[in-house]
């Protein structure tokens, strides 16, 4: 069985409170032996830490998500630095970014939190996990101001030109459930022809289910569906795609190689 890596899962979300251990077991049975779990608010950091400590193959990232702006305070930026000092097993800063699709986005405040988190990541040599909805050009500008910063724009929804600009900066793009929908022609075209070294696969559980799982709670066990779709779009071998994207995730997040471990 291939050792898949879900590069973006919110397994700590309340939607999994009733069956979190079962969801982890289903993911392992499906070959998903590692998951990167990005936090969205400071209040959730302790529970995320406890989960990733209790369960093997789960790797934490800590950050302040723009959609949850009302939950953040400026003091949380100092708290983030102290938290990272105390938790060296952290694999990234995030989820952070910009979201101008919100009804009341307060762009200035979003930019302040993003800039601070990008600086924290750069200073500590950590990658960033970025959310960019209707804001990719601004995110790109922020990245250009910080040469040497690494990371991924998850659930990429931009243009081919924006994707190339990210690759030129050394950034990867995360692809999940939306790529399985036939109407997502622009995204499918980008994924079909992009350099594979910049590709990560994700579920964004519990959100963004694939087309076969529409309307249901998403979970990491659905990752093989993403792998199969992307392989078909690229006319590629499923096993090679799985191995290569997992290697991309291990390289970006400095994850151990779990391929020799059992799924039980």
Image (spheres, grey):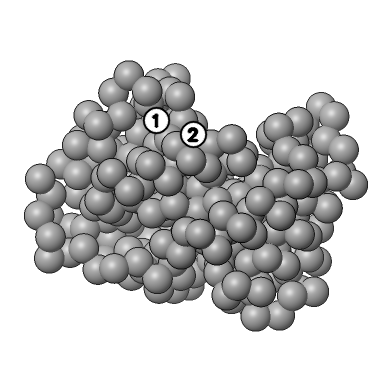
Residue 24 in percent (x, y) is at 25, 37
For mark 1, give the secondary structure. loop
**Residue identified by numbered label 1:** 218
Q: Quadrant of the C terminus?
A: top left
Q: Do the residues under discs 1 and 2 have CB atoms within 8 angstroms?
A: yes
**Residue 174 versus residue 75 in the image, above or below:** below
**Residue 137 versus residue 127 in the image, above or below:** above
Residue sitting at x 77%, y 40%: 73
**Residue identified by numbered label 2:** 208
Task: Say which label, 1 or 2, has the lower sequence index.
Answer: 2
For mark 2, give the secondary structure. loop
The local crowd at label 2, few if under 14, some if 14 to 19, many if 20 or more residues have their Cα within 10 Å, is many
Residue 145 in percent (x, y) is at 80, 74
Image quadrant assignment for residue 17 = top left
Q: Quadrant of the N terminus?
A: bottom left
Q: Does residue 94 show up?
A: no
**Residue 5 versus residue 102 in the image, above or below:** below
In this rendering, position of residue 128 left or right of residue 105: left
Kindly identify which numbered label has been placed on residue 171.
Answer: none
Residue sitting at x 42%, y 46%: 49
Image quadrant assignment for residue 200 = bottom left
């Amino acid at each position: 069985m291939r050792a898949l890596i879900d590069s973006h899962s919110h397994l700590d979300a309340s939607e999994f409170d009733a069956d979190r251990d079962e969801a982890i077991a289903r993911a392992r049975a499906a070959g998903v032996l590692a998951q990167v779990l990005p936090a969205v608010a400071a209040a959730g950091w302790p529970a995320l830490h406890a989960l990733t400590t209790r369960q093997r193959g789960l790797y934490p990232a800590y950050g302040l998500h723009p959609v949850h702006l009302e939950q953040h305070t400026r003091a949380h930026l100092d708290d983030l630095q102290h938290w990272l000092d105390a938790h060296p097993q952290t694999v990234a800063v995030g989820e952070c970014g910009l979201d101008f699709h919100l009804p009341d986005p307060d762009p200035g405040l979003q930019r302040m939190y993003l800039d601070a988190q990008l600086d924290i990541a750069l200073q500590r040599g950590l990658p960033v996990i970025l959310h960019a909805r209707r804001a990719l050009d601004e995110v790109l500008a922020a990245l250009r101001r910080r040469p040497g910063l690494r990371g991924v724009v998850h659930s990429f929804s931009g243009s081919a030109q924006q994707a190339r600009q990210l690759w030129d900066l050394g950034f990867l793009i995360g692809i999940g459930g939306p790529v399985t929908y036939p109407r997502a022609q622009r995204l499918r075209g980008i994924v079909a022809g992009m350099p594979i070294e910049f590709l990560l696969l994700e579920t964004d559980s519990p959100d963004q289910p694939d087309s076969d799982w529409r309307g249901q709670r998403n979970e990491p066990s659905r990752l093989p569906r993403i792998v199969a779709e992307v392989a078909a779009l690229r006319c590629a071998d499923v096993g090679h795609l799985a191995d290569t994207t997992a290697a991309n995730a291990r390289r970006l997040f400095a994850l151990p190689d779990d391929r020799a471990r059992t799924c039980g």
